[in-house]
Every structure is written in C-alpha cells, then in structure tokens.
Amino acid sequence: MNILVLNCGSSSLKFQIIETDLDLIDKNADVQKAKGVIERIGSQALITLQAAGKPSMKQATPLRDHRAALDYLLRWIVSPEAHIPGIESLGDLHAVGHRVVHGAEKFTRSLIITDEVIRGIEDCIELAPLHNPANLKGIYAARELLGVGVPQAAVFDTSFHSTMPETSYLYALPYQLYRRHKIRRYGFHGTSHRYVAFRYRQLTGKSKEETNIITIHLGNGCSACAVKNGDSYNTSMGLTPLEGLVMGTRGGDMDPSILEFLAHKEGMSLSEIDTMLNKQSGLLGISGLTNDMRDLLAEEHEHQDRRAKLALDIFCLRVKKYIGAYLAEMGGADAVVFTGGIGENSPPIRQRVCSGLGFLGINIDEQLNKEMYGGKEGEIGAKGSGMKTFVLPTNEELLIARDTVRCVKNAPRRW
Ligand code: ADP
C-alpha cells in the first residue's frame, strides 16, 4: 500500500509517501517514495519536494490554507515531473496517516478516523490549542480532496505514554483537578520513543518484556522516556510539551512561582509569560544567541562564548538528571538510546551527557561516538560497560505509515 503520511503544523505541512504492508513490515522492507515540506502556509509558501533518488525541488507560491497546500502537493505527486514509481493517479494513494499531537486519555492507540474520532480530536483541542487544530485541518483537507473512500488513520504523540502508571502521570495537585479537568502528565514524542524502543528490540533480539531502556529524544523539542517491559513507564513532558528537559526555546522544569513573580515584576500577562516560556527560553533564552544546537556548539568552540557554554552545560545536566531519576524509578535499565536531530548527530553533546556516569555503567567509546552521525545507527558504548549506549535515528513517519496499514487491515499492533 502507498501511504501518504501527513504532519500538519499551524503554518506547515510535512509529508512522506511510504510503500508498506504487513509483509513489508515483517521484512523491514518498506520503501520511502517521496518526502517534502510546505512552510509559511497562509502567505507566500516555501515548498520543498523530493521524489526518492532525485534532487529536491524548491518553489515558492502563495497558498491560502492547508487545503490549498494539500491540493498543490497532490497535483505534484501525480505529475510527470515528480514521476514517483507506482503512483500515476490519486487512486494509487491507498491511505493517509496523520500525526495528531494530543489524544488525551481518549486515544490510547492509533485508529481509523471516523466522524466520532474527529469529534474526539476536537475535544482535545483545549489541551493542545496550537497543534490539534492544525492536525484537524490536514484531516479535513485530505477527506475533501481524496474522498471519504480513502481510509485515514490518526497516530497520536501521546498514545505510547498511555501505559504510564498513576504514580508517574499524576501531579501532586488537589486530586479533584485531575477529576474535573484531567490535569495530568500525558507526554509527547510518543511515536519517536516507541519507534526507537522497537528498533532497539530488533537490533538486540529482546522480547517486549525484556526491553528496559531510557530513550532520549533531543531535537528542537526534547524529552526522555523510561521504557519498562517495552511500555512507557514515565516521560519528561507533561500536560503540554513545556515540561522536562531544556529545549531549543522551552525551558522545561522550573518553579511555577516564577510565573506570579514575573507577572508582578515585569507586568507581563499570562499569555506573554506563556510565549516567553515556549518561544524565548531554553537554549535561546540562556545563551541570548540561538536555539540551534549546531550554532551554539560553534559559538562555544570558536568564540568561547560564556553563555553558549552555560546553555549547553545546563542542557546536558538536565538530561543527566533524568537518566539518574529514571534509573532509580525503574530499578536499573539495560541501555540508554539517543535519538532526534541532536541525539543522532552530536557526538559532543552525547559525550557531555554521559560524562561522569561511569558509576552507573554508562561509558562511551570516544571513537565510536565520534563516528556516529548522519543517519547511522548502532552502539557507542565502550565494551564491557554495565549499560549499553545506542544511537538510533528516529523515524516517526515510518511508524505512522505502518500503523496506518495495521489500522486499515485491522491487524494487531505488535509492539
Ligand atoms: P525537530 O524536533 O523540529 O524535528 P530535529 O530533530 O531535526 O528537530 O532537531 C533539530 C536540532 O538538531 C537543532 O537544534 C539542530 O541544530 C540539531 N542538529 C542537527 N544536526 C546537528 C549536528 N550535526 N550537531 C549538533 N546538532 C545538530
């Protein structure tokens, strides 16, 4: 089956076309046929499209909304110019898989989108006011342009974490707030944590029950996950993706009293504080320079910038803290797995996170670590270490495509 995977943001649409099926999943032989992104939807959109094995094409054209963006994309997909093998007409797109950010307690697994599912995703909007409406726009547009005959599946960022016990997901707030408003930790990046946990199992030959690892997703957003017996046991993001690790522009954990203090001292409104916490904090906030890890590492290296170093030190220390916390919660683990743009590509950050953790059995092999970037996967731990350390590139789109096939064919999820 050719699956169109869509990931719609407030002004962007990322896509991939992946050929997969139950037998291809078993053989790990799925084929990525095209990928791309449309940014700045709503004005002069920037479009990058690439059919597999061909150079990417960049274009700019005004696109009013997500429907117009998807329409543009579908026209390209079937054009002779794209020339995607096995896709000549829209009928060759067999299903659509959507990334949906928040599924709250309602959605604990991927499923086929019906009117009822759409209403459920709408109900979750108040928990993810920036993300779920954009995901819904993609769903409405695909229904309209491809027709209701083409099945669509929703794959939720939160659903992998639905196995967390109450002790992990409840905040120590008055319990009735959970009852009344479902205020609790939900966790995000679930598709990524689930994918790398599965990949770890494939590479090591472990059963689900034997999978006790800590997965660390470091990208623009960052989160850690304690995977116990193959399920999410705890994770660092909370009610929203603001909690936990230091990220590009989000600060992660902090004393909530800072909010009131700031409102008083700086005369900021709650919405201004929210913007500051989401967009002006984290690596950007501490360094005052950038949220981009590559640029920050270059500033530290080339100009010995004090605040760039400070931002990096705080970033790495926070990851270390979560590794320690999760090892204590899980009673030990077999491996630490790095993923995400930073986790996959930055040997110095992995080195800094793991330094001094020899007493836990975490020792990195300097040479293996240095050589592991740019999509490579494997172990970077020194031989004989008590715990293994892996770099496993994430592939959320692949997991969305595979889940879509499983939903369409009503096949059980096996991890
Ligand atoms: P997103 O979370 O938006 O999917 P990514 O997972 O692509 O983002 O991660 C983006 C981050 O990865 C940026 O901070 C970028 O600087 C960082 N990154 C990418 N390549 C490297 C590299 N070679 N070294 C260090 N950081 C990198």
Image (cartoon, grey):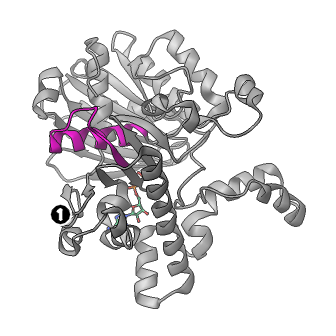
Is 210 a magenta residue?
yes
Residue 402 position within the rendered picture, expressed as x and y whole percent measured from the top left:
26, 28
Q: Quadrant of residue 395?
A: top left
Tell me the quadrant of ligand 1: bottom left
Residue at (26, 68) in percent of width and height: 364
Please, what is the three-letter code of the amino acid marked with disc 1?
Answer: Gly
Up the image or down, 47 lies above or below 230; here it is below
| Most common secondary structure along the magenta stretch | helix
Span colored in magenta:
190-214
Up the image or down, 13 lies above or below 297; here it is above
Up the image or down, 412 lies above or below 378; here it is above
Instruction: Report the side of 218 relative to 121 (left or right).
Output: left
Q: Name the quarter where the C terminus is drawn.
A: top left
Q: Which residue is mark 1?
A: 384
Q: Name the quarter where the N terminus is drawn.
A: top left
Instruction: Report the side of 68 relative to 90 (left or right).
Output: right
Is 31 a magenta residue?
no
Residue 43 position within the rendered picture, expressed as x and y whole percent measured from the top left:
55, 47
Q: Nearer the viewer, residue 280 or 211?
A: 211
Looking at the rendered structure, the number of numbered marks drawn on it comes to: 1
Q: Residues within 10 Å of mark 1 (few under 14, many from 20)?
A: few
Residue 100 position within the rendered picture, expressed as x and y whole percent measured from the top left:
47, 31
**Residue 193 visible:** yes
Q: Nearer the viewer, residue 9 or 264?
A: 264
